[in-house]
Image (cartoon, rainbow, N blue to C red):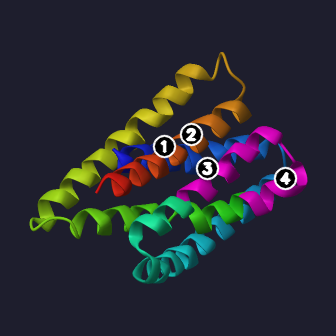
Amino acid sequence: VCMFFSNFSFVILISWVPVFLSHMMDISLVGLSFLFFSLLGAIGSLTMGILSDKWGRENVFILSNLISSLLSFLYLAKVKEFLFLQTSLLGFFSVPFWILLTLMAQERVEEKLSVTALIQTSALLGGLISPLILGLLLPYINMETLIGLLVGLPFFLSALLIKIKSSSS
């Protein structure tokens, strides 16, 4: 479920945020912000992996997704001066979800291949349905609201579900 929500957010983030940003800044800055998004995503994945070895995968996942959620909700404010940095930082905090969730699942079971296939399928389903939902809602709700909510809320729900799960264990 967490992989579904996280990838739901991530697919909207990488497919619709550039469209939104192109209305707010020069297209070359949009491209540059996603260059930094990817670069910081790679650095974030390494950093979050190291931190998760020290502080626990669940804790790092929760922190990473809560920060991703907050940064996503900030799209609602449309602060032009912050959009480049905001999008770049989202890479650092949002990209590691895939690695962290995969590791959490694999470390809990004997059948690594089965659980990996299950969470990958969940991710694909989240990624398939998110553009459809955004597209259906777009005629009725402005883009910054949709991006803020459809990226921020699922990241938040993923963090909340992991927190509930780790508290009950």
**Pointer 4 residue:** 26
Q: Are the two marked residues, 3 and 4, in contact with CB atoms closer than 8 angstroms?
A: no
Q: Earlier in the sequence, mark 3 or mark 1?
A: 3
Task: Say which mark, if any, is on residue 157.
Answer: 1
Task: Point out the stretch of residues depicted in magenta.
Answer: 65-86
Which residue in the rendered view is the most extreme toward the right? 81
The question of residue 22 being in magenta is answered with: no
Q: Main secondary structure of the magenta part?
A: helix
Q: Are the two marked residues, 3 and 1, in contact with CB atoms closer than 8 angstroms?
A: no
Residue depicted at x 55% and y 43%: 12
- Rendering coords of residue 100 (x, y %): 39, 67
Q: Are the two marked residues, 2 and 1, in contact with CB atoms closer than 8 angstroms?
A: yes
**Pointer 3 residue:** 69
**Element class at badge 1:** helix
Residue type pointed to by label 4: Asp
Question: Mark 4, mark 2: which one is toward the viewer?
Answer: 2
Residue placed most toward the observer, 16 or 120 = 120
